[in-house]
Amino acid sequence: MRRSVRVGGLAVLVAVLVAACRPVPPDATLRSLADLRDGRLIGTSVEPAQFGRSADATLIASQFSSVTPENVMKWEVVHPGPSTWNHAPGDAVVAFAEEHGQRVRGHTLVWHRQNPAWLTGGSYSRDELIAVLEDHISTLVGRYEGRVAQWDVVNEAIADDGTLRDTIWLRGIGPDYIRLAFEFAHAADPDAELFINDYLIERGGAKAATLLWIVASLRAQGVPIHGVGYQVHALVPSLMPTPEQFADEMRRFASRGMLVEITEMDVALQLPSDPTTGPQQQADAYGSAVMACLAVRECTGVTTWNYSDAESWIPGEFPGFGEASIYDAELRPKPAYERIRQLLWWNLRAR
Ligand code: XIL
């Protein structure tokens, strides 16, 4: 009996090792590889116009199991007047996702950018601004109740020096705006996973310390906050943390009961990029983040910000940088794409 158990165990080990040596199947998409794991998702940001181009639509549907509206659920698009709403583009994203069995991450309910002039230029008392915020969140989150699984409720609330960022929300409401936003979102969809999302928090430091304090104090007050989103806009690949550092950082939040997710990853290269080292460095950086996520049970997925260099926001925002995505401008997969596929495959085989 003991002997056969031992032999059986050895056979399993050999089978796993043999399987692990098999190359990743050439036709396996990111999503098909991720799907084989315990619910881990691989996503991209999207714009509705992309659904109208068949190569893009096919790529989004076949490669990704999660989508995030890049802009269309932001205030300036969805809520252009105090009582005017523009839901059609957001509806198109949710409909596309439902048609293709994809999760939607809602983005974003409270931010200091892409706000309409009526909001930024208005003069509101504290109570009035709270009422405006509640109306916005309850309308938008309520519209997609049960259909948008995660929301970035509060985005980029912390300044680079670790203080709370000076925004219309902080000025008009006070630090309480963070708690209120989560409570309004939870009231509108009690099942949605509610995230606080930020950049440059993957390597510890002042911002991550403040974030941990915010999360701990909100949880101590019983506020419905469920996750931390790591944007990971890696402008300089060499500044990426190692997978171990990144995973440890995520675990500091996971051990306090939080989900974590990589929500907006891209890796911008300085142009002109070196054709040999550039794509490899980029693949390393994407790979580090994917490895970190796979190493942390509470990491729900990895979303890339823009799937292709043709769509990328980087050249417009950071002149002199670009080529940040996992597909090039002709939708050809780059080494970073192949790296992610391999990591998902090895990870799967190792289980
Ligand atoms: C960016 C979009 O990609 C651009 O199209 C837009 O002009 C500006 O915003 N952090 C975020 C995202 O949370 O919403 C930002 O998206 C990128 C930085």
Image: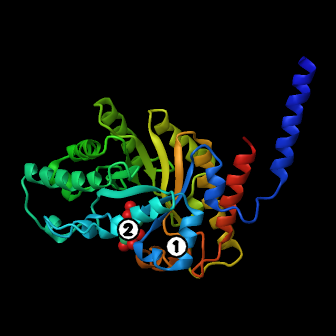
Task: Give me the residue at 26% from left, 46% from top.
Answer: 188
Q: Position of residue 102 (x, y in %)?
A: 50, 57
Mark 1 neighbour density, 10 Å: few (under 14) some (14–19) many (20 or more): some
Q: Quadrant of the C terminus?
A: top right
- Mark 2 vs mark 1: which is more N-terminal? 1
In the picture, measured across the screen, residue 208 lies left or right of residue 186, that is: right
> Horizontal and vertical percent for residue 231?
46, 57
Of residue 21 and residue 271, the one placed in the foreground of this image is 21
Total label count? 2
In the shown orientation, is residue 331 left or right of residue 27? left
- Apparent side of residue 191 relative to residue 333 in the rendered image (left or right): left
Please name the residue that numbered disc 2 is placed on. Answer: 92
Q: Which quadrant would the N terminus be assigned to in this image?
A: top right
x 69%, y 72%: residue? 277
**Tag 2: amino acid:** Ala
Q: Is residue 17 above or below residue 256?
A: below
Residue 72 visible (yes or no): no
Q: Secondary structure at mark 2?
A: helix
The picture quadrant where one finds residue 332 is bottom right
User: What numbered label is drawn on residue 57?
Assistant: 1
Q: Secondary structure at mark 1?
A: helix
Q: Estimate the spatial distance between the alpha carbons at disc 2 and disc 1, rounded to whole Å.
A: 12 Å
Identify the amino acid type marked 1.
Ala
Q: Quadrant of ligand 1?
A: bottom left
What is the quadrant of residue 325 in the picture? bottom right
